[in-house]
Image (cartoon, grey):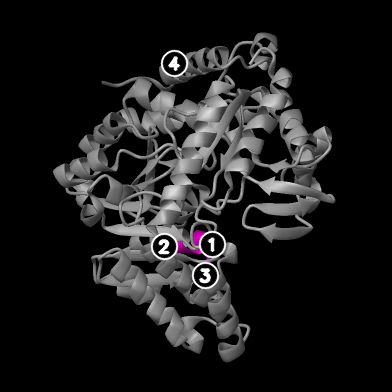
Amino acid sequence: MNTSISDIEDRVGKLLASYLESSGQPELAAHGPITPATNLVSDFTMDSFQVMEFMMELEESFDIMIDMNSLSNTHTVGDLARVVAGLVD
Amino acid sequence: MSLLDKFAAAAAIRSQMASGGHDPTQVVMDRIISPTEGIVEGRPTILAGTNNYLGLTFDPACVAAALEALQNQGTGTTGSRMANGSFAAHAALEKELADFYEMPYGMVFSTGYAANLGTLSALLKPGDTVLLDSDAHASLYDGCQMSGADVFRFKHNDVESLEKRLRRLGDKTADCLIVTEGLYSVLGDCAPLDEIVALKKKYGAWLLVDEAHSLGVYGEGGRGVAEQQGVMHEVDFFVGTFSKSLGAMGGFCVSPHSELELVRYVSRPFIFTASSSPSIIASTHEALRQLRARPELRERLWRNARRLYEGFKVHGFIVGPDVSPVVAVRLGEKEVALPFWNRLLESGVYTNLMVPPASPDRHSYIRCSISAAHTEDQVETIIQSFANLKHLLTGV
């Protein structure tokens, strides 16, 4: 199945919103729409535990395994979507 | 942005941690009186957060062994074992550790951190795969990352999550190392090693277990959780530390695989570190003998652990599902936990504060580690000191 990068970005953004809502992240309401440029740490002050927890949710949702080493330069929803795109095809 | 600007974030953490009066990361024990008591800011303080599970730090035989080594072998080894030679005592301790675990090969490192870094970075290489419990200690994460292997996490203690990943790996499981702990040190929960071993065998993977907090605590012989669950001989590599039940400093790896002897030649944290001082090796060796010869230490430890756990429950505190020598009390928000921890210290009880992201979920905890050396009165005082502060927890 070929899924476009924009579809994946959209899905990652929705999963992020859902994760932040469930964890009561205060910045969510004040933040505009989540876009590929949304930065997990600077826009939502996610700590390292939350980032790793969210990675687990992505793994479950896309049925993939994300190598921790692939996350070192991953900061935005777009970065994450590219990592996911490389694993779902 | 200059080089040092990045420390602004650390400065913010420091000032937040100190906002309750004392910084939990900077407690100074002015004097140590016994394994369970010290002087902090002039106050006699019960030490309930030191991981001194068997209380052997002041054991006369351990102290005498250290003194004897100090006098006869000097203060230090002044170098790496690979470059500057091994003292016979280091090799003897390796032999005793291997014997203790009923395995042929043993290796000693200068710290527990170095043991994990040194073992994992040598065992794994780029192209290999690690399946790591998500709550594993930082040293296990760091060792895996240092190796360059592909690192995937599975949900904490979740064998279904582990099996899903093993299944996905297909024929790559022959190069896959599962990495887990025995007793997890923050919440005091144990890994289902019997089930993990079954999966390791089913998929042909390898297993490394860190028994840092479970050595001396679990199992009939005090070897750890794997012994308790009857799977000790199915584990490929055990790592652990001397800095908890053995009351000193250092780390080890034991294994049934002869390749452990070759780890010495390729493990940078082993090769490029000075070996432990003779006094440390001597007290560790004696502590291991004490551990083997005195099962009553474990009995006392567990009696104290059960009393502490039940005492907290009676007073309505939220504790983990199982009794263990690590008892973590859930306090919810950091803003509640920080003053609670401060008032405990001021009342003469030293504990450990765990706040996100260092805690394994979104809650803050006060963690106690109980010792065989705690007296019944000390255990009651710890419980009562918590109960006296219950009013700070409204809404938790």
Judging depth in this view, the residue of B125 and B241 nearest the camera is B241
Instruction: Please state the extent of the stretch shown in magenta in the rendering.
Output: B111-115
* B328 up-or-down from B150: above or below: above
Q: Amino acid at mark 3?
A: Ser
Q: Are marks 4 and 2 on the same chain?
A: no
Residue of label 1: B56
- Do the residues bearing badges 1 and 2 touch, measured as CB atoms within 8 Å? yes
* Numbered badge on residue A11: 4
Residue of label 2: B291
Q: Which-is-in-front pick, marks 4 and 2?
A: 2
Mark 1 and mark 4: Cα distance apart in space = 55 Å
Q: Position of residue B167 (x, y in %)?
A: 21, 35
**Quick one: label 4, few (<14), some, or many (20+) residues within 10 Å?**
some
Answer with left or right where residue B176 lies relative to residue A51. Answer: left
* Numbered badge on residue B110: 3
Which quarter of the rendered picture does the C terminus of chain B lie within? top right
Q: Which-is-in-front pick, marks 1 and 4?
A: 1
Q: Chain of mark 3?
A: B
Mark 1 element type: helix
Mark 3 and mark 1: Cα distance apart in space = 19 Å
Q: Are marks 3 and 1 on the same chain?
A: yes
